[in-house]
Amino acid sequence: MDTATTLSPVSQNPANDLPEFVSFTEKAVEMVLAAIEQEGLTGHGIRIGVAGGGCSGFQYTMDFEKDAKEGDVVLDQSRGLKLYVDPMSAMYLQGVTVDYIQGLQGAGFKFINPNAKNTCGCGSSFSA
């Protein structure tokens, strides 16, 4: 089961409001851990967020992160993977599942957002 903590109190901790705040599938966890090992970033986790842009208004962001920042929601995934989410992004990531898919057109992370009103054709941006 995933758990969530924050470094410092935020006005509302969305991880406490939804049992599945944001989560990675086992395949996504496996691919992130492989990338961390390949890059020599032992002890790092993933910062997942939302930024303005993309063809639908918002786009997802992911990057390696060593430590949480003040106000972050910190989520423990399987196999020791930590997810770091800033408070602004947290409200857009409630219920999101991140998967890793492989197909004829390539491979990559797929964001499954049940709250998105619209998504673009490539799946990397959305509107809320």
Image (cartoon, rainbow, N blue to C red):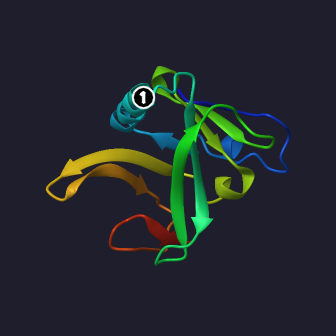
Residue 20 makes an appearance in the image: no
- The x, y position of residue 17, in whole percent, is 68, 46
Q: Nearer the viewer, residue 34 or 20?
A: 34
Q: Residue at x 22, y 47 (%)?
A: 102
Q: Nearer the viewer, residue 2 or 68?
A: 68
- The x, y position of residue 21, in whole percent, is 58, 45
Residue 33 makes an appearance in the image: yes
Q: Amino acid at mark 1?
A: Leu
Q: Residue furthest left?
A: 104
SS type, badge 1: helix
Q: Nearer the viewer, residue 119 or 35?
A: 35
Label 1: which residue?
Answer: 33
Q: Is residue 53 above or below residue 87?
A: below
The reply, left or right, for residue 117 in relation to residue 87 is: left
Q: Residue at x 33, y 44 (%)?
A: 100
The reply, left or right, for residue 45 in relation to residue 13 is: left
Q: Residue 121 falls in which quadrant of the image? A: bottom left
Q: Residue at x 55, y 70 (%)?
A: 58
- The x, y position of residue 50, in whole percent, is 59, 60
The reply, left or right, for residue 98 in relation to residue 95 is: left
Q: Residue 30 falls in which quadrant of the image? A: top left
Q: Nearer the viewer, residue 40 or 126?
A: 40
Image quarter (top left, top right, bottom left or bottom right) of the C terminus? bottom right
- The x, y position of residue 53, in whole percent, is 55, 73
**Circle 1: is it few (<14), some (14-19), or many (20+) Cα within 10 Å?**
many
Q: Is residue 18 above or below residue 66?
A: below
Q: Is residue 114 above or below residue 19?
A: below
